[in-house]
Image (cartoon, rainbow, N blue to C red):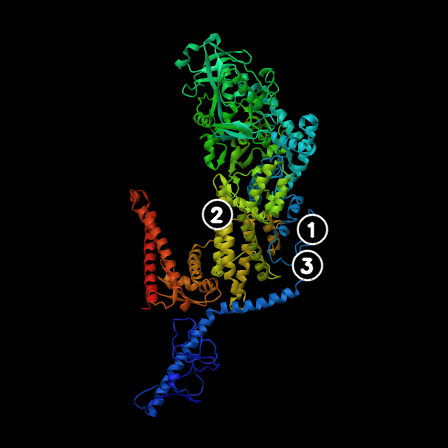
């Protein structure tokens, strides 16, 4: 007969026995899980009533236990032969003894497991408690506790009793700046014994509000200034504004025309100057407000304007001194004349537009579009009936001012005409036929060139060489004057172009037109076509001053100025060959004689004196004695010659020394698509629009208030819709500053994406939450220590201090070498990836209330406070507002007298006692293991905790993993961690990843394992490891490697090569194991 499973309660045939559950502490497991499903019941068990999950196999979700109680449980099995009662009793006792032994082992294992996982279990329980407590707190909290009290302007900000739950840049950034300014933190002391550090802010034009390029300048300079101030320097940062000459004239004229329908000539000189000062007072205030909103810690007590009394005095003094030495003189020269503005403009204000073919474009003052990109040919009759000579020009109206015709001396076609004359068809003027081999290319066109010395730069030089007449045919408004002939007098220049062609046709001298590529000079201010015209101008002879300036940068033995980035030092001097190449681009097909043209004495002259004049020159003031020469000039590389070179020349000549020791040239900002920012494109960004946020409608309104014409306005609006469909979200000054400084790694151009600024605004919230966490863990009565005893601290505390040291060292070295982007990376990486992601998470179990963590808890509190205090001071130059607010909330250290503000506290320095390379090396492995374990978790089940295993190859790795078991359990969010050696087998159902050649990690997923996903991970890891191996192998096998590479490098790279091979081997084994599991072997 079949044997039965006998219990004290009932008999059940063994083929259908149940795993009966009773709520007792200990049990043993029956059955094996069905691997086909994570929820499958044990084979051999029928469906029991709902029961508690088996603790020995978490995947078994049905009852699979035999309950061990004080009563005897007899288990029998089927057998064909009867068993004697005595034997049965002996066997049962033996089994009971074995089970009791197993029970003790299980108890020990469970106790050990409980100890390991106490932090996690406490964490889970604590999280529930915290959630309940938070719920109670929310019900009981007073909203006013989270609101900052009203702070009067200039007083120290009053902080709320409780920190707001989220970072709000508007709330955080208010009040601090006015307190800083009122407290005199920005003011430099000319009598201080501290070493000085001086920057002169490149004076922004008073023509309107600042744009994002000015924001970049302010962010970089204020970062440097705050760092130097915290590092113990007597810091001076001088603010100022530039009257901007033509730019201001254009803007004010447009404003007059738009509001009053008047020109500057209608209101007169005095009236127009008065309008300029009104504009300055209105928009100068806007600019200063923007600088303050950006957090620029400028010394406002020394604010200046290039047209104020002191600066005007400096300009007059400089003019007189240079004129006495013969370096300033007056002469008639060709200038870039703007017929709309009726003024000369500098080269920097001329844009050269490429015309590839016949083109009609709008010109201010003309109802119809004007034709460009054509070459008009016509004939001049020769004197004495010798026939005609044909010339060609793109500006046929200028023939009214022709005074000669040039040919090449070796051109046989015109050899018989040397010394002869042509006759002007409209005024009878004799035009000598001259030979000029410098200008004329006999292969180009007809080989004959009309010469208009008063209206063409090349013809101007020909006129001087051959002593020709210089006849100006245009009025200042661009109309034909009396010199152009009675038939054309009073005509606008481009209307005269048509009239001249018609007149030539009438005389039978017109020879046709053809397409011609050309460059058209356009005024960037008025959009008018620039007209070369002879005007009396003041000039500065720069030859002698330029020689000194060149030596100051390029001299090997007496180098005084360093330009950063260094490649711009090569551009400090332009040689003749470079000038010829540049000229050929602008005037293709022509020959050139290169001559140095003295710089025009224009608005750049007053700006060139700025480093001197802001310190009181020509008077010998305390500021001039204490702060000249300045320490650094920081500006854009686009004005290296227009401004920087002038300052160096005038500073050395009038100040007796270079105006600064270093020049840092930042990249130029473009929009996210790499396009140059332009008001006509609508892609110019106001820093305040990023700081405060603005809707798309608000962006449109700003455009409508500008000076754009209707076509430009509509086009600009469309561009804004594409780039900012939802407007610009509020980011705050700190996020904008940090983003701009981080962009400086981009060579000479920055493609600004506002979304990147938004990302840093979200990071500010991370900082905010880190301090909120700290305040809850430090407690109300916490007193920071005077010093840390690092050796007795938990390893995680020693680690965060050691990597903080590295971050401090890297940040300082990056600032010193002007690699600002690397500084932002160093600070950001420490805060984000080491403090917030690792340390703060790792120490949370210490605060769960267990007495065994009492010592660790105290060390964690002290370390956390030191990290936050140091980290905020480290970050402050980059993000001044949020760091001040958070720093003010930190408890004050015992027995110390903390500074009033973070901005005048000491900048962090390296603490040698904190450095611990061994612990950093261990934590590098630990963090690697944590990252890999996290990556193994199923995407669909991130909240589930799974058992983890670490396969260690070597005692060092094994010891490290054991020592940091709690950190791995906490950071990787796993239920347990088992350490395996190479001799141990890995349980089935595990996902695997390779940390390095000595460590692999497994996550016991069992039924949730996605074989295809795991296979893909291994494939990618193999490709990565193989690529590294191949590249290194190729380098080591290259010609001359063994002879040239130092032995230490060869040994190090050989180790790397072997580690890659070992890693590939481990991946092979993992792939084979996975393959067997897929095939069910």
Residue at image point 47% right, 82% down = 22
Q: Establish if 540 lies above or below 195.
A: above
**Which quadrant is home to the N terminus?**
bottom left
**Which quadrant is home to the C terminus?**
bottom left
Q: Please name whichever residue, 370 or 44, is drawn nearer the observer in this view of the structure.
A: 370
Give the distance between the C-alpha atoms of the residues marked 3 and 2, in whole angstroms: 42 Å
Mark with earlier residue (3, 2)? 3
Give the distance between the C-alpha atoms of the residues marked 2 and 1, in whole angstroms: 38 Å
Q: Establish if 726 lies above or below 1.
A: above
Q: Position of residue 1067 (x, y in %)?
A: 34, 59
Few, some or many C-alpha atoms within 10 Å of disc 3 (few <14, some 14-19, many ≥20)? few
Mark with earlier residue (2, 1)? 1
- In the rendered structure, the answer to whether residue 642 lies left or right of residue 27 reads right
Depth-wise, is mark 1 or mark 3 nearer the camera?
3
Give the distance between the C-alpha atoms of the residues marked 1 and 3, in whole angstroms: 15 Å
Residue 327's label in the rendered image is none
Q: Position of residue 13 (x, y in %)?
A: 38, 87
- In the rendered structure, the answer to whether residue 111 lies left or right of residue 682 reads left
- In the rendered structure, the answer to whether residue 757 lies left or right of residue 66 reads right
Query: In the rendered structure, are the residues bearing label 2 and label 1 in contact, judged by CB atoms less than 8 Å apart?
Result: no
Q: Please name whichever residue, 941 or 28, is drawn nearer the observer in this view of the structure.
A: 941
As drawn, the residue found furthest toward the top would be: 384
Which quadrant holds residue 685?
Answer: top right
Depth-wise, is mark 3 or mark 2 nearer the camera?
3
Q: Position of residue 504 (x, y in %)?
A: 52, 17
Label 2: element kind: helix
Q: Which residue is mark 2?
A: 810
Q: Which residue is mark 3?
A: 144
Label 1: element kind: loop
Depth-wise, is mark 2 or mark 1 nearer the camera?
1
Mark with earlier residue (1, 3)? 3
Q: Which residue is mark 1?
A: 151
């Amino acid at each position: 007969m079949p044997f039965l499973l006998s219990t004290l309660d009932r008999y059940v045939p063994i083929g259908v026995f149940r795993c009966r559950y009773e709520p007792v502490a200990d049990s043993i497991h029956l059955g094996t899980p069905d691997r086909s499903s994570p929820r499958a019941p044990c084979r051999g068990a029928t469906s029991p009533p709902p029961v508690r999950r088996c603790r020995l196999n978490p995947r078994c979700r049905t009852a699979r236990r035999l309950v061990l109680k004080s009563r005897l449980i007899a288990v029998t099995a089927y057998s064909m032969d009867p068993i004697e009662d005595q034997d049965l009793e002996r066997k049962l006792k033996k089994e009971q003894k074995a089970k009791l032994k197993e029970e003790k082992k299980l108890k020990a294992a469970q106790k050990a497991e409980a100890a390991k996982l106490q932090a996690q279990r406490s964490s889970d329980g604590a999280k529930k408690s915290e959630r309940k407590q938070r719920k109670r707190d929310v019900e009981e909290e007073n909203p006013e506790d989270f609101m900052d009290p009203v702070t009067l302007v200039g007083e120290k900000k009053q902080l709320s009793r409780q920190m707001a739950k989220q970072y709000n840049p508007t709330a955080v950034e208010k009040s601090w700046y006015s307190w800083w300014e009122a407290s005199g933190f920005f003011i430099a002391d000319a009598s201080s014994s501290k070493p000085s550090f001086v920057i002169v802010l490149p004076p922004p034009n008073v023509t309107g509000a600042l744009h994002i390029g000015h924001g970049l300048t302010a962010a970089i300079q204020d970062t440097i200034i705050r760092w130097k101030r915290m590092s113990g320097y007597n810091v001076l940062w001088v603010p100022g504004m530039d009257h901007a000459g033509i730019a201001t004239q254009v803007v004010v004229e447009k404003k007059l025309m738009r509001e009053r329908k008047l020109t500057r000539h209608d209101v007169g000189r005095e009236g127009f100057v008065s309008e300029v000062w009104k504009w300055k007072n209105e928009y100068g205030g806007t600019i200063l407000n923007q600088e303050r909103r950006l957090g620029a810690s400028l010394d406002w007590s020394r604010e200046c304007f290039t047209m104020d009394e002191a600066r005007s005095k400096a300009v007059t003094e400089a003019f007189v001194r240079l004129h006495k030495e013969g370096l300033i003189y007056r002469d008639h020269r060709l200038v870039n004349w703007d017929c709309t503005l009726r003024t000369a403009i500098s080269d920097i204000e001329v844009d050269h537009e490429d015309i590839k073919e016949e083109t009609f474009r709008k010109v201010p003052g003309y109802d119809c579009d004007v034709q460009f990109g054509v070459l008009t040919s016509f004939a001049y009759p020769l004197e004495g009936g010798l026939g005609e000579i044909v010339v060609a020009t793109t500006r046929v109206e200028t023939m009214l001012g022709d005074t000669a015709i040039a040919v090449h001396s070796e051109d046989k076609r015109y050899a018989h005409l040397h010394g002869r004359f042509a006759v002007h068809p409209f005024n009878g003027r004799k035009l000598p036929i001259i030979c000029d081999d410098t200008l004329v290319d006999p292969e180009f066109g007809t080989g004959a060139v009309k010469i208009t010395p008063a209206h063409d730069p090349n013809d101007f030089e020909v006129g001087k060489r051959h002593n020709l007449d210089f006849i100006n045919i245009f009025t200042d408004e661009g109309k034909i004057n009396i010199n152009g002939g009675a038939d054309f007098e009073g005509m606008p220049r481009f209307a005269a172009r048509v009239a001249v062609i018609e007149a030539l046709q009438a005389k039978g001298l017109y020879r046709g037109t053809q397409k011609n590529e050309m460059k058209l000079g356009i005024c960037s201010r008025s959009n008018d076509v620039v007209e070369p015209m002879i005007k009396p101008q003041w000039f500065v002879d720069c030859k002698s001053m330029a020689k000194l300036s060149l030596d100051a940068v390029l001299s090997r033995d007496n180098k005084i100025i360093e330009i950063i980035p260094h490649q711009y030092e090569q551009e400090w001097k332009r040689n003749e060959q470079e000038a010829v190449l540049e000229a050929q681009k602008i005037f293709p097909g022509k020959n050139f004689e290169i001559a140095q043209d003295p710089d025009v004495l224009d608005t750049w002259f007053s700006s060139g004196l700025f480093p001197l004049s802001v310190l009181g020159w020509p008077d010998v003031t305390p500021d001039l004695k204490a702060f000249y020469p300045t320490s650094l000039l920081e500006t854009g590389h686009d004005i290296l010659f227009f401004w920087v070179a002038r300052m160096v020349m005038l500073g050395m000549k009038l100040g007796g020394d270079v105006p600064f020791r270093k020049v840092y040239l930042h990249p130029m900002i473009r929009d996210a698509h790499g396009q140059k920012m332009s008001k006509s494109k609508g892609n110019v960004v106001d820093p305040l629009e990023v700081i405060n946020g603005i809707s798309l409608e608000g962006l449109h309104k700003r455009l409508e208030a500008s000076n754009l014409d209707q076509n430009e306005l509509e086009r600009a609006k469309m561009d804004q819709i594409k780039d900012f469909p939802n407007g610009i979200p509020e980011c705050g000054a700190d996020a904008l500053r940090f983003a701009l400084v981080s962009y400086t790694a981009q060579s000479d151009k920055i493609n600004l994406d506002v979304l990147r600024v938004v990302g840093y605004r979200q990071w500010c919230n991370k900082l905010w939450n880190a301090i909120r966490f700290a305040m809850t863990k430090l407690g109300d009565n916490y007193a920071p220590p005077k010093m840390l005893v690092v050796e007795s601290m938990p390893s995680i505390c020693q680690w965060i201090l050691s990597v903080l040291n590295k971050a401090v060292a890297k940040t300082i070295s990056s600032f010193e070498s002007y690699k600002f982007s690397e500084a932002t990376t160093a600070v950001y990486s420490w805060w984000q990836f080491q403090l917030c992601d690792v340390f703060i998470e790792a120490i949370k179990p210490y605060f769960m209330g267990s007495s065994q963590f009492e010592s660790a808890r105290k060390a964690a509190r002290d370390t956390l406070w030191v990290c936050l205090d140091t980290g905020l001071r480290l970050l402050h130059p980059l993000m001044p507002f949020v760091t001040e607010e958070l720093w003010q909330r930190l408890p004050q250290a015992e027995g110390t007298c903390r500074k009033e503000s973070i901005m005048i506290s000491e900048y962090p320095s390296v603490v040698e006692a904190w450095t611990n390379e061994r612990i950093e090396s261990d934590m590098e492995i630990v963090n690697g293991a944590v990252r890999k374990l996290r990556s193994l978790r199923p995407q669909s089940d991130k909240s589930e905790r799974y058992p983890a295993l670490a396969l260690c190859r070597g005692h060092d790795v094994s010891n490290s993993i054991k020592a940091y078991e709690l950190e791995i359990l906490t950071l990787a969010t796993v239920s347990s961690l088992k350490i395996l050696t190479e001799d141990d087998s890995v349980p089935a159902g595990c996902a695997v990843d390779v940390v390095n050649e000595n460590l692999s990690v497994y996550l016991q997923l069992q039924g949730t394992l996605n074989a295809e996903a795991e296979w893909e991970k291994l494939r990618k890891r193999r490709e990565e490891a193989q690529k590294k191996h191949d590249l290194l192998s190729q380098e080591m096998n290259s010609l001359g490697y063994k002879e040239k590479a130092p032995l230490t490098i060869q040994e190090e790279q050989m180790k790397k090569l072997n580690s890659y091979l070992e890693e590939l081997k481990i991946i092979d084994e993992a792939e084979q194991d996975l393959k067997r599991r897929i095939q069910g072997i």
